[in-house]
């Protein structure tokens, strides 16, 4: 075997090693991209679940406050209606009396 054959053999082996190295790098890059995408999806799902939970919590607080206000204003309306019904005749008589005088 002469020097030229040895050099060509070394060159051939070097190219094979470079090709294998490039394939390994490409595979690792693809694996990294897949892991990053998986991580992004997990974070997104987690955030969406937290947002949904927060939204449900806030809606429950809003519903409770609306119910409390409904009861409060219902009581105030009932009180005004009672006062109106109790004093309606008196107020009408008073208005008629003032108008006729």
Image (cartoon, grey):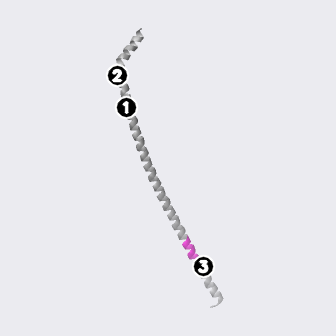
Residue 73, quarter of the rendered image: top left
> Which residue is denoted by mark 3 in the rendering?
15
Most prominent secondary structure in the magenta stretch? helix
Q: Which residues are magenta?
A: 18-25
In this view, the residue farthest toward the top is 101
Instruction: Please tell me how crowded label 3 is: few (under 14), some (14-19), or many (20+) other residues with Cα within 10 Å.
Output: few
Is 23 covered by the magenta stretch?
Answer: yes
Residue at 53% from the left image edge and 67% from the top image edge: 30
Residue 35 image position (x, y, % from top left): 50, 64
Q: Name the residue rendered at 40%, 35% in the picture.
A: 69
Q: Please, is residue 30 above or below residue 43 in the view?
A: below
| Alpha carbons under labels 2 and 1: distance apart | 16 Å
Mark 1 or mark 2, which is nearer the start of the sequence? 1
Q: Between tags 1 and 3, which lies in front?
A: 1
Residue behind mark 2: 85
Front residue of 31/55: it is 55
* Cα gap from disc 1 to disc 3, whole angstroms: 87 Å
Q: Which mark is residue 74?
A: 1
Residue 98 pos. (x, y %) = 41, 11
């Amino acid at each position: 075997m002469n020097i030229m054959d040895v050099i060509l053999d070394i060159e051939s082996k070097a190219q094979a090693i470079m090709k294998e190295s490039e394939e390994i790098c490409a595979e690792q890059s693809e694996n990294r991209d897949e892991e990053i995408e998986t991580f992004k999806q997990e974070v997104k799902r987690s955030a969406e679940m937290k947002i949904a939970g927060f939204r449900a919590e806030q809606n429950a607080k809003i519903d409770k406050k609306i119910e409390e206000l409904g009861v409060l204003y219902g009581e105030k309306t009932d009180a005004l209606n009672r006062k109106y019904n109790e004093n309606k005749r008196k107020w009408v008589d008073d208005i008629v009396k003032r108008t006729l005088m």
